[in-house]
Amino acid sequence: MNKWVFNVRLSRNIKHIQYLNIRFYSDSAAVRVRFAPSPTGQLHLGGFRTALYNYLFAKSRGGKYILRIEDTDRTRVVDGAVEQLQEDLKWLGIEFDEGPSNNGPYGPYIQSERLENYQRRTQQLLSSGHAYKCYCTEKRLELLRRDALRTRTIPRYDNKCRSLDDEDLSHNEGKKYCIRFKLNQSDGFFNDLVYGRTARNVAAVEGDPVILKSDGFPTYHLANVVDDHDMKITHVLRGVEWQPSTSKHILLYRAFGWNPPNFAHLPLLINKDGTKLSKRQNDITINAYRENGIYPEALLNFVISCGGGFVQNKETNNVYIKPLSELISKFDISLINSNSCQVPLDKLGYFNQAQLKIELNTDLGRKRTTGELKNILKNTFSNDKSVELDLSENHLNKILKWSINRITNINELIHENYKFIWLKPSESAIKSMDYDIDIVIKLKHHLINIDDFTIDNLGTVLKEFSKSNNIVYSNLMKMLRNIISGLKQGPGVSEIMVILGKEEVIARLNKACVKG
């Protein structure tokens, strides 16, 4: 396997200059990436961004895409989260070459099923002198944290157990312990594919980290390094919040004598007000978008519009929907933004509207959309016995065509302002209304002869009708609104008539003509 070789300077002290050959996997190697979420809740927009960019990178290089579940923090695991995660990703069109559901040559792909491997690797570090047993109690660690707060310094472990001698170890025999990794004074250099040359002397700012907890479960630092090596991961794409830890991981790779993968850190996602996009925002979960009528294609294109990775279209005011195959072919990791990415959540609707137009322009998409709308209407109005629904395909297509520039997703068609479309007053409801049946009959015959069924013309026609029949215009509008919609308020009566269409308006008036 081809590798890049860097001579890395480990010390600036001229008398003790050290160099170490660090070999990173080269771009000519068979690309293998992984998406490694924790099953602690639902997949949200930030996690999806990471999953998507890993997928785009792997597939643009003809590589393999792996799903690995990092569930070693057992206190935070949520039942059903793994199944929901895979369902969400499948809905988005992201499929894995290897993972919990389809296995592969480097499984198992769930970390809690790999504990024996982590313990074996930890013993390897203990034997080579790169790790040690730490017997410090939680009480002592808490005192260290409090002391740091009192002196206004960064809390860090003081590496007390690193220097325990044989006598000290014998006194601690039988006590509970964890395993810590020995950090050394090194810049932990690596070339970030998004941020460029990056280095951090972690030993200067941190104490030795825990790599194996007292319960036998590994921490993130050990587990992800061991798994990435064993699963032959060539590139790690993850959020920039993990960048400070990467130098620490480089040191772990070095201690094992392994070649690190290449690293690319994705910029922070922020709200329009500058605050961090948080998984605690329940309305940004993939499942919430799905239930609210957002198309997967809209989400894909919305996310890439925020984070880069593509040549930007100069016509920034227009929204374009590109299929996943095109996103793969045009993805360029060097074009990912290195600055924090503002996520204009209010713009997602424009992407969804663009995809809705695409759906309605094809026979299959139109049929699928009318089917979805029919189910929404049945679920919404099935218990309302006072209305009759027109669920014919012809009527639904007509409404979708009218609404295409007014809505961003079909769920909006059941909102209060659009209920008149579906609320066809029942005979009992009409009988309970107070109106002059003779006026209704006259109006029906008058409208039958109107060819220009537009808002402007209907406004003129209805005003002339009220005047010639000595009816107060506002009273006529109230009566007409009740008869044709069953609603007391909403859009203008002329607009309601245009939306329903001449044939439907006449049919609803005709029902009112047989009152009695």
Image (cartoon, helix red, strand yellow):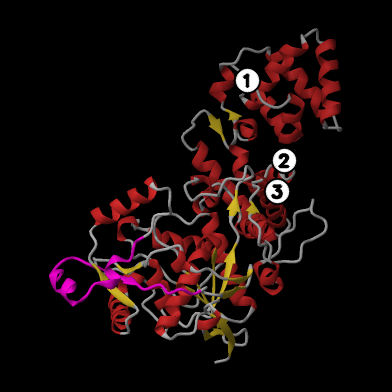
Q: Position of residue 440 (x, y in %)?
A: 72, 18
- Please indicate, yes or no, whether residue 191 appears anywhere in the rendered image: yes
- Residue pointed to by mark 2: 406
- Please indicate, yes or no, whether residue 391 appears anywhere in the rendered image: no
Say which label, 3 or 1, has the lower sequence index: 3
SS at circle 2: loop
Q: Nearer the viewer, mark 3 or mark 1?
A: 3
137 up-or-down from 55: above or below: above
Between the residue at mark 3 and the residue at mark 1, the CA separation in whole angstroms equals 31 Å
Q: Which amino acid, mark 2?
A: Arg
Is residue 212 or residue 396 the one in the foreground?
A: 212
- Residue pointed to by mark 1: 488
Q: Residues within 10 Å of mark 3 (few under 14, many from 20)?
A: some
In which quadrant will I find the C terminus?
top right
- Residue pointed to by mark 3: 350
Q: Which mark is residue 504?
A: none
Magenta span covers which residues? 157-186
514 up-or-down from 244: above or below: above
